[in-house]
Image (cartoon, helix red, strand yellow):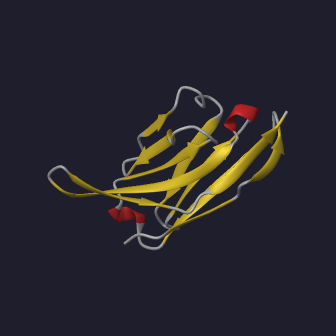
């Protein structure tokens, strides 16, 4: 069971920046994919960005060019640098870890979430 703890959320004005960090309870070397998802009030949880164990990144179109995901396997962390924030980025942001178990079986782990609020 991987425990994930997020930090770094808060209130920021539009155009500002925030950096989210997620610490895993065990070595991220064993985790195939790590990522960030978000959920705004009344909406479904959506992918923000993911990064594979090989460093391949994937971003939602809405954040491309503004957000950057990175992982540090020495520190067992995954970070999300968010620049040029917009009010529509307001959401609870969740850290995710995905580990391949066997064949088509994957284990998903989630953090408790951190609130990001962008004021206009």
**Residue sitting at x 33%, y 64%:** 30
**Residue sitting at x 37%, y 63%:** 29
User: Residue 87 or 71: which is nearer the viewer?
Assistant: 87
Find residue 38 and report its horizontal and vertical position in percent.
57, 44
| Residue 86 appears in the figure | no
Q: Which quadrant is the N terminus positioned in?
A: bottom left
Q: Which quadrant is the C terminus positioned in?
A: top right
**Residue sitting at x 58%, y 44%:** 39
Find residue 105 and report its horizontal and vertical position in percent.
21, 54
For this orientation, the residue located farthest to the left is: 103
User: Residue 78 or 116: which is nearer the viewer?
Assistant: 116
Question: Position of 53 compared to 59: left or right?
Answer: left
Question: Position of 67 compared to 53: left or right?
Answer: right
Find residue 72 and report its horizontal and vertical position in percent.
51, 59
Q: Is residue 80 above or below residue 86?
A: below
Find residue 23 and report its horizontal and vertical position in percent.
54, 66
| Residue 45 appears in the figure | yes
> Picture quarter containing residue 108?
bottom left
> Picture quarter containing residue 43?
top right
Question: Position of 112 compared to 120: left or right?
Answer: left
**Residue sitting at x 45%, y 36%:** 58
Q: Is residue 34 above or below residue 24?
A: above
């Amino acid at each position: 069971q991987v425990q994930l703890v997020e930090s770094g959320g808060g209130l920021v004005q539009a155009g500002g920046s925030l950096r989210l960090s997620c610490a895993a309870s065990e070595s991220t070397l064993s985790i195939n994919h790590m990522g960030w998802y978000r959920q705004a009030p009344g909406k479904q949880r959506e992918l923000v960005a993911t990064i594979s164990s090989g460093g391949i990144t994937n971003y939602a179109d809405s954040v491309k060019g503004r957000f950057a995901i990175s992982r540090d396997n020495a520190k067992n962390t995954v970070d999300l640098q968010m620049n040029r924030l917009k009010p529509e980025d307001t959401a609870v942001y969740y850290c995710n870890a995905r580990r391949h178990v066997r064949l088509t079986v994957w284990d998903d782990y989630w953090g408790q979430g951190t609130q990001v609020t962008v004021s206009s």
